[in-house]
Image: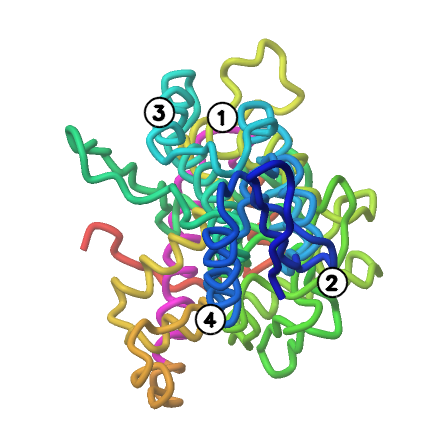
Amino acid sequence: MAFVEKSGKNLWRVRYPKDDGGFGTISGFTSKTAAENKAHEIEADQRRGQFLDPDGGKLTLAEWSIAWFDALDVAATTEAQYRSLVRNHILPRWGTTRLDAISGLAVHTWGKKLRAEGYAQATVITIVKVMSMLLADAADERLIAVNPIQPRRRGKRRHEVRTERVWATPEQALGVAAQAAALVGDWAAVLMITAAWTGARWGELAGLRRHNLHLDDATLVIDRHAGALHEVNGRLELGPPKTAESARTITLPPFLVHLLRTHLNGHDHPHVFVTSEGELLRRSNFARRAMRPAADGNHHRTRPRTRVHPVLPGLVFHGFRHSHKTWLIADGIPDVAQARRLGHRIPDKIQHIYSHVAPEVETRLINALQHRWTIALHTLTGNTTTPSTEHSAERLTRLALPVATIPAVDLTA
């Protein structure tokens, strides 16, 4: 309960209880009546849950961030990202600033400055988003009146040209995989092909274990509890996949069942995909040693151990997932089947609950993927013009299907 006490000659102050068990003070009242009125107002606001502690806004953002991270309950990878952004970008600029001294205009100006310094638009958006989350929770805790970061509706609207994700045709995906095989080993090619023909994410495949690969049933299971490999502060650990919908069973086309069975016979590690040395996969290492040169080529290198040529510059591993989605659209696969396979949630809640994938739709999907593989492999093995690509194509053919079993296809049709 708030109360009034004399603080000097003709001066009174109001004391009020705080959530931490202590008392706050509002001073400067020149009459006891004014102080009592304020005390009654505080009590009424506290009962309604609307009381704004005048001392709350005096906390610096650095002080508030400590309590905020202690209460944060997100995936370990997400928390690591937030801590990195707060430590490297937010605190250097705002750490010593009081919460009640942060204005939305100042934050948007700061974001504009970050873009001018060369940070990508997506990076700046994420930094400001985390800053907004900090302040929104401060407002929820009644430390400040409102979150000062609001959508901008003033000034000239920015027209950002959205860069389309690079995606691959089946022939390009197989070409990149063939070059990856020549660069680091067959395992990299099998990983890329699996990504392109299942739409699975990097973490889902890097974390895939043998007991979740059911080749007799032609299925791959993404476990809801340990279905993805996460890298947090340099440490690799298994954890849940990206979303609840990401826990799913993916049906495999026949060629991929054969390819994965051959691949598993080549090592005895509990994980399906590991390096040639039997180590778990790290995204940055794979990108540097396999993904980038396999897609971009290495013509800029003077004397590379293996010369590879540009196939699809700019393609990243996640681009295989975009490719898979694009193929499904082109093959007329219904949205619900696409969403279930990729681990997406259908935006329409009713449709998400009541839509199902009929067996004949799943069969059509698998047949379409098998057909795309057959044509891509036929194209690659029939158009090998460089020693590295020719060697890689032969290795993939040996792993997957004898060339003699591939029916002749009119590629000009």
Q: Is residue 298 left or right of residue 346?
A: right
Q: Residues within 10 Å of mark 1 (few under 14, many from 20)?
A: some
Q: Quadrant of residue 212?
A: bottom right
Identify the secondary structure beneath mark 2: helix
Residue 48: which disc?
4
Labels 3 and 4: the sequence-earlier one = 4
Q: Determine the main secondary structure of the stretch shown in magenta.
A: helix
Asked if the residue under mark 4 is in contact with the one under mark 3, i.e. CB atoms within 8 Å, the reply is no
Mark in the foreground, 3 or 4: 4
Residue 264: which disc?
2
Residue 109: which disc?
3
Q: Residue at x 34, y 77 (%)?
A: 336
Labels 3 and 2: the sequence-earlier one = 3
Identify the secondary structure beneath mark 3: helix
Q: Residue at x 65, y 73 (%)?
A: 223
Labels 1 and 4: the sequence-earlier one = 4
The three-letter code of the residue at mark 2 reads: Leu
